Image (cartoon, rainbow, N blue to C red):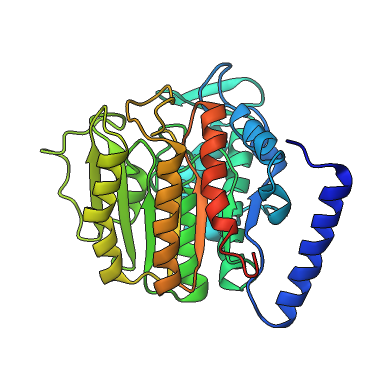
Amino acid sequence: MFFSSWTERLLRYYYLGRDKLLHFFGIKGRSAWISAPICVTEHMEREHPESCKRLEIIEKILRRSPIWVMLQKITAPEVSDVQLARVHSRKYLRFLECKTPVSGSLKIEEDTYLSANTLKSARYAAGAAIKAVDMVMKKQAKNAFCAIRPPGHHASDERASGFCFINNIAVAAMHAIAEYHLERVAILDFDLHHGDGTEKIFRDDNRVLFLSLFEYPLYPVMDLATYPECPNNTVRTPLKAGDGSNEFRDAIREQWLSRLDVFQPELILCSAGFDGHKNDPLGHLNLTEDDFEWLTKKVMLLANRYASGRIVSVLEGGYNPRTLAKSVKAHLSCLVKASPFY
């Protein structure tokens, strides 16, 4: 049901006034929604699953919900070269710059295309993740959601892969470590596909705990029996085709929660992929919006216990735009309730 313009206006004034009051007393404000117009431009082949429709429908559905007026809407800055250099080699970034076509698109990996808009979009997507860290660390927001594309968790320090060019979550983690001197940052990746790029970037970096839940076997193709040994700072949590709520929740309880309790993260970053939904065309899991809501509540409890509530959630996968939007709405409905005086 759509809000009337007057209702939206009154609610907006209420939240803006409340933010000023909270800021005066040094209290964290509303959840932040961080995006950039260029992230909605098309930069893959026509009918590619990583389409601009993903963000368009998320926003369309959220605008019909009370959640929308509760969010601080922030326009992302472009990431700086210094911030990128903490994660990606200059050689790799130069490769992307040189390969960027003036028009059309260029296939650089299987199902991964570089167009005139791609690198610019990726730089603003990473900039959104940087801005989100800054906001939660400076107490300008309790938590933040980055509505961005292209996704990032398959990109390694020197390779694009799986629709990903810049590893947004890795850039955010390194920014938090470098600028705020954090010693324990947790990355929770619940995308349908294993975040192989993130694992490679942080392999054996004990400042980062990387937890990845994914369908196996599925892209990226890997044989767990012969794949490089799991690093000490990584928890791989494979599910099989057909697994649903029970298997998902049991795996989180048994493999994630106790490890996070031991690690005691100072900041929680989510590689928020919603392609494990039962209606997603790229996978075979049977998750629903309720499962993403349940996980978000568990993450919030941990964040409140160890990280002063600080959560940054960065969009990864989800390729049925309508079920993606409903899943994001379930995720955000929890995050906004963490705001003071909700």
| Viewer-side residue, 20 vs 342 | 342
- Image quadrant holding the C terminus, namely bottom right
Outermost residue toward the right?
A: 6
Tell whether 54 sits left or right of 174: right
Question: Furthest residue to the top?
Answer: 46
Q: Nearer the viewer, residue 177 or 296?
A: 296
Q: Residue 169: image x %, image y %?
A: 46, 52
Most distant residue in the left direction: 225
Quarter of the figure with the N terminus: top right
Drawn side of residue 327 relative to residue 157, left or right: right
Asked if residue 89 shows in the view, the reply is no
Residue depicted at 26% across the width and 33% down the height: 243
Q: Is residue 232 visible?
A: yes
Q: Which residue does the image show at 63% across and 47% down from the upper left?
A: 124
Q: Whole-percent x and y of residue 233?
A: 25, 60
- Which x, y percent locates residue 227? 16, 40
Tell me if residue 304 comes above or below residue 44 in the rendering: below
Quarter-of-image position of residue 97: top right
Residue 307's place in the image compared with 151, above or below, is below
Residue 336 is situated, as x and y percent measured from the top left of the image, at 60, 57
Kindly identify the residue that appears in the image at 61 percent across and 53 percent down: 128
Q: Is residue 284 above or below residue 210?
A: above
**Corner quadrant of residue 115:** top right
Name the residue rendered at 43%, 26% in the picture: 280
Q: Say left or right for 299 vs 117.
A: left
- In the image, 329 versus 192, the foreground residue is 329
For the image, the number of numbered tags is: 0
